[in-house]
Amino acid sequence: MESHLFTTGDVVKIFQYEGTRQSVVVAEKNGHIPSAIRGRKKPKSLRTWTLEQLPEIGKYFGYFKPFPAPKVITVFNQKGGVGKTGLVATLSRTMALHGINTCVIGLDPQSSITLYLTNPVVRLKSLQDWTVPKTVKDYLAGTSLEEILLGTDLPTLSIIPENHLLSDLNNELGVKSMRHKKLGPLIKDLKKIFNVIIFDTSPTFNSLAECALYESDLHVMPVACEIGCYSVMEHNYSSLNDWFKLIGEEPTKRILIPTMMANNRISQEIYSSYLSQYKGEILVQSIRRSIKGAEAESEGLGVIEYGPTSTLGQDYIEVNKAIYNLLSED
């Protein structure tokens, strides 16, 4: 697959820049952003940048800046199929596009976020190049942090990947006392390198989810505007609060994100019910259903790079800003 290239117009859209395209050209001429690739064909004045260059551009034109101290986010709901992977991918890539050193920690044996961010279909030349990645399980067994971290197509985004053996780790942690503190040393090490750390969890309230929630500054809970999620939402929400009481801790700051919004009566009624029942914790902005998410993933991109002005792109931009602003309050 050919490398993705981005024009001055793309830069303006991706970073919601309110200035003109000429301002981007001036910034390049003055050395504030990386040098563009000039068009080999007409028009030769066309400027483009590679995906790898975007984080340096984001530092200058973007709407996010690094936090004064590292932040940890957990994206978790016990219900699957709520758009968790897309949310983690887009949030992490948006942070990284702004030049913020970001690390995703995969805790789901299904490995959805690992496959999304490492994109083996593009990266691997053949199936023989595939190896089972190391995970937090290996770190807890003594493997160094450097050995478990994988890079991505963005120089400011790394991932601690997943594999099926995380199920074994979860079972091992389940019989240990104070198990929710077991990832503390890992987070301490990661905070020396990264400004934002994002846990992507399994859709099960298991020991690894407990570890992630305990270490987090913010719990992002995607809630689908669908019957399946709505029917278990009250139980899932209360079980989180019950667990924090059990360990004698205040619940992690939480934000609920309405997802999978559809243009039908039931979806709209569920959305309204969420807003009423979880007022103060739920975001009014929803993430609507759109084919753009699947299209972006197939291209190995996030929605923000693939379609920043699309309906889905605009939804994610507003959601990401809300998450960023909540983290900035601390």
Image (spheres, grey):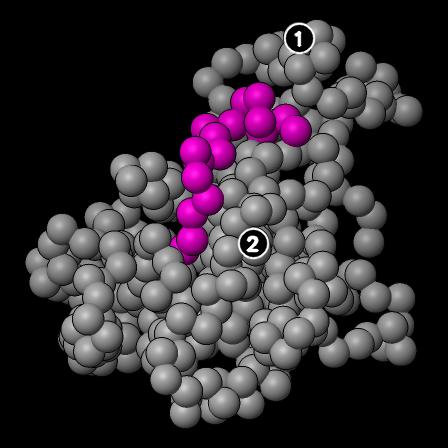
Identify the mark at residue 190; answer none if there is no mark: 2
Q: Residues within 10 Å of mark 1 (few under 14, many from 20)?
A: few
The part of the image, by quadrant, that contains residue 295 is bottom right
Identify the mark at residue 145; answer none if there is no mark: none
Q: Position of residue 207 (x, y in %)?
A: 40, 81
Amino acid at circle 1: Val
Q: Position of residue 261 (x, y in %)?
A: 31, 60
Q: Who's the residue at 58% across and 27% down the image? A: 59
Instruction: Give the magenta range.
Output: 56-73
Check if residue 72 falls in the magenta segment.
yes
Q: Who's the residue at 49% across and 34% down the image? A: 66
Residue where numbered disc 1 is placed: 26
Q: Position of residue 263 (x, y in %)?
A: 29, 59
Residue 252 visible from this viewpoint: yes
Residue 263 visible from this viewpoint: no
Label total for image: 2
Q: Is residue 5 left or right of residue 294?
A: right
Q: Is residue 320 above or below residue 278?
A: above
Reading the chain from its start, which is encountered first: label 2 or label 1? 1
| Camera-side residue of 272 and 24 | 24
Q: Residues within 10 Å of mark 2 (few under 14, many from 20)?
A: some
Q: Is residue 102 above or below residue 138?
A: above
| Camera-side residue of 294 and 140 | 140
